[in-house]
Image: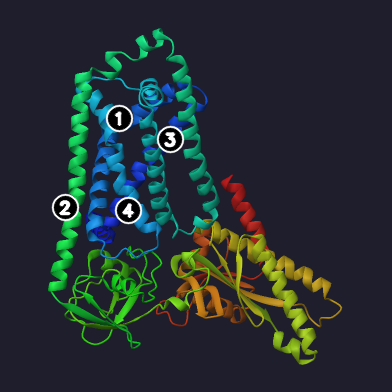
Amino acid sequence: MAAIALSRLSELVRSTSARQVRLVCGVILFAYVVSHFLNHALGNISVDAMQVGVYYHTTFWQFLPVAIVFYGAALIHMGLGVYALYQRRQFRWRTIEPLQLVLGLSIPALIMAHVIGVRLGQTLYGHEKLYPQELYLFFVVSSGRLWGMTVLLIIAWMHGCIGIYFWLRLKPFFVRAAPYLLAAAVLIPTLALLGIYQGGRSVAADSEDGEWRRQNYTQREVGTFAQAATLDRITGGLTIGYFGLLGLVLLARGVRGWRERRGGMIALSYGNGKTVRVPKGLSVLEASLRHSVPHASVCGGRARCSTCRIRIIGDHGGLPEPSQREAFVLARVGTADPSIRLACQLRPTTDLSFFQLFMPQTLSANAASSPARIGQERYLVSLFVDMRGSTQLAEKRLPFDTVFIVNRFLGAVSQAVIENGGQPNQFVGDGMLALFGLTSDPQTACRQALKAVAAIATHVDELNELLSHDLRQPIRFGIGVHGGEVIIGDIGYRDHIVFTALGDAVNVAARLQDMTKTLACEAIISEEVRRTAGLRDDALPQQEVAIRGRDEPMVVRVVADTRTLSALLAGDELVAA
């Protein structure tokens, strides 16, 4: 167990990059921002509601373990943001990426006065600045600060939303979740700003009463002028220090660029006659962007995908060793060839010749809106179904009649698949590949596939009855079902691109469908699907079969009559209930 734990820890370390650490810290900070904004939104009810909300807000976020995680995340996130300013050599990404960096770097300077005035004032002097005091300051004493705080809220929210977008856009569920996320991204800050406005109006009206000011704006709440001056000096010093740090980073960038230019230029040859000269230290992807050379990169150079892969031409022994993150990504896509590297991570120091493995013009038109269509690994259930006897069916019929019957068969099968949550994917002659699990978990996908098998039998029975006057014998079929990790994406060339799945699990499902002929059954289901679906071990007959291309025999379940699956699945659901 210890060895397994160490192995998993080692893999986790190898798979973790500075960007991912920054992402985790950013998610923690964004959770705080969401909590704070929802607290502001209570101002649409009353200032008292804001006071009640801030009690629970501070109780959670000032709980010592949570506070340590929060402030640690804030410092790490800011530090990595400053490091990103230094590290990034090329800013010709899409506008949203440098915008996110600029917004993030502006937040510490904008929030410094608020954090020191509230949190440090409480720590040093025991101040109790809550909503009445802050709203009085913004709406009565110094209305100019209100605009600064509004700008801060908008910038912080935009920065967080951009980061969440970059994180989630590669996830399978993002397309379905995007409308709800957009609604939340618009409603939460809107309600927060309205809450501040309504609360400020209420406090401004109440503050006209001298008794309110004597109770809510005392030395205990806001401190003395001397204490305020001390906090202002701390704020000024830290702000100057922060801008000084940014200045040093920009200076370091200039020094690095000067040294790289003095260190000489290298030539990058793209294998298609295109050659560019760049300073040493740029990654191959940054070089492509600098010289406007099209280069595939779905994740934007974050080493979260492998679409920027290149193959080195000639000797690759003098190249820098892959970083832990690059080695992890290459291992995940099953690449052991040392001549294949990630363009976003490789920073050559000598002349280099290579060619791209994924050319941008071969990507589908909708790839930008759905990165999963370019290539993504996930668990799917593949269902192959084939019509039996179609050759004999065509021998004594007109071609149009044969096409009509085959289309009716494929229509019945497709309807059964769609009704049970699957997606018809490929039609090959009188056969079809259907995929389950594109929008569901593995267990649900397996059960959906088994329900579709039973539904196919029902729909084909109805078709046989409808065409009984025109068929010499009923239409028969064979089905193979298997589940496992596959690669999904757009496959093809130019206008002939289809979204499909590739992998061993798909091939096995096709082999199982072929075996239904020799085993004289209607369907063969892999043990993997049976177990994941939660069917009883004795529900279906078990058999070992040899799969072409596999060394070991495979355990499968033979279904002589697919109509029996409906009762088996219904019985299991009753037992579970």
The crowd level at tag 2 (other Cα within 10 Å; few <14, some 14-19, many 20+) is: few
Disc 3 + disc 4, Cβ < 8 Å: no
Q: Mark number for residue 37?
A: 3
Q: Which residue position holds label 1? A: 62
Q: Nearer the viewer, mark 3 or mark 4?
A: 4
Amino acid type for the residue under numbered disc 1 = Gln
Above or below for 216 versus 496: above
Question: What amino acid type should be assigned to the residue bearing mark 3?
Answer: Phe
Q: Residue at x 59, y 52 (%)?
A: 572
Of the numbered discs 4 and 1, the one sitting upstream in the chain is 1
Direction bottom: furthest residue: 395
Tell whether label 3 touches label 1 (CB within 8 Å): no
Which structural element holds mark 3?
A: helix
Q: Nearer the viewer, residue 480 or 44?
A: 44
Name the mark on residue 101.
4
Give the label, 1 or 2, closer to the camera.
Answer: 2
Residue 289 drawn at (x, y percent): 34, 71
